[in-house]
Amino acid sequence: MTNVLHLSTFIRRPIFDQDGDRIGRVQDLVARVGLDAHPPLVGVVIRIEGRNLFVPIRKIGGLAEGRVRFEGRRVDLRRFERRPGEILLSEDLLARHLINLVRGRLITANEIELAEIDGKWEVVGVDPGRRPIVRRLLGRRLGASVPAGSVVDFASIEPFVSHVPSARLKIPYRKLAKLHPAQIADLVEQASHDEGEEIIDAVGMDRELEADVFEELDTTHQLEFLESRSDADAARVLGRMEPDNAADLISEMDQERRLPVLELLPEPQQHKVRQLLQYNQDSAGGLMNPDFVSVPATATVDEALAEIRASRAPAEAQNAVFVLDETGQPVGAAPIAALIRARGKDLALSVSRTQLAHVHPHWDVLRVSRKMSDFNLTVLPVLDEEHSHMVGVITVDDVLEELLPQGWRREFGPSSVEE
């Protein structure tokens, strides 16, 4: 059985030479992060006569016994300087936020666990529970009476390094990309500003993912992370967001920035956003997305499915294909499931719901939600006031987000900081 040790066991403890004389104390342990799932220990920072000195791990003994020994002939008296890729386990990790990539949560590292594997010391786990705190305050015996928390395998952990000036490390995009954009947004909202910037910087390698994350952020954080960006950079992010979300964000920006950013948006995004800005954010017009899938009344099932494949409308808006007459009015809505089950040569209208519920741009969100609930809809068409043509769709996720209390994700979300 592998012997697991706690980082707090060693910090500020004395270090002895081979004759048993005390020569200083342990200031920190140094690990190298990068390709290894469990970062290897590379050395110990010891404090001797007011100086922090580095000792390679090969010259350290007694870790397993809890009595640290210097096993070299002499200590290098040059002051410790962190090398690229190195982190100090106590200074950089202990009592700081870390990302649990498996659960998509922030945790607080109340203890770091170490183990000797195949003759090498490695960082194997993080304990976010209360027992380590009690153990440090009241002693090991009283701390043992506190229920043990769930130790997280360090292989699923990603540390923040924005506070480590010489680490030259960044959160790998490929790791964050495994999370849903809403989970990443939760992490940003729970993190400090610098930590949030580090996450945003990492997902920025994928412009689509960056835009998806921005859409999931609450307005306060959206504005916070756009404040330091140029108008051109802000427009680049907004240009990849859904038009309704982009319009909402522009309307919340400082007035002097709205027009410059809007004019930098690419066409046809700029045209769509300008149209949406005409409506109140809390109205059907403010909630709707102008992108949806539609076909003429003469279209077949195969043609409707081809339109779905070619469409760039958000997936939630593609739950139904709207069948329009020659004037642009919807005469039916074909659920995607019905289209998949139907024969390809059948008319899309033949598998459509023809008793269509709809709303108008000036309707408020409560009236919209009542309509969606009464007709069991996940996507609802928006018609202009004259009933002359369809101008957009409202999806159930947009209605839910509008109805939930402000700050709901921070208070009720699954990604709150673990104790």
Image (spheres, rainbow, N blue to C red):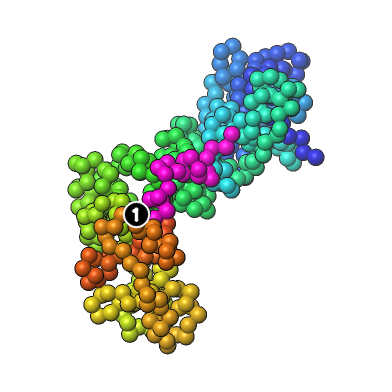
Instruction: Please indicate, yes or no, whether residue 200 appears anywhere in the rendered image.
Output: no
Q: Which residues are magenta?
A: 398-419
Question: Which amino acid type is shown beneath numbered disc 1?
Answer: Val
The quarter of the displayed image where residue 96 is located = top right
Vertical position of residue 122 compared to residue 234: above or below: above
Q: Nearer the viewer, residue 69 or 138?
A: 138
Question: Percent from the top left, x then y, of residue 409?
Answer: 46, 44
The answer to whether 114 is drawn above or below residue 270 in the figure is above
Q: In the figure, 347 relative to 256: above or below? A: below
Residue 50 in sight: yes
Q: Is residue 233 above or below residue 285?
A: above
Residue 178 placement, left or right of 6? left
Instruction: Check residue 237 for magenta coloring.
Output: no
The picture places residue 166, in percent across and down from the top left corner, at 47, 32
Q: x, y (%) of residue 243?
A: 30, 57
Decide which of 219, 377 is in the foreground and name it.
Answer: 377
Magenta span includes 414: yes
Secondary structure beneath dot 1 equals helix
Query: In the depicted view, which residue is nearer to us: 175 or 374?
Result: 374
For the C terminus, which image quadrant? top right
Q: Residue at x 44, y 85 (%)?
A: 344
Along the horizontal axis of the image, is 202 left or right of 47?
Answer: left
**Residue under numbered circle 1:** 365
Among the 4 quarters of the image, the one containing residue 348 = bottom left
- Residue at left 65%, top 20%? 137
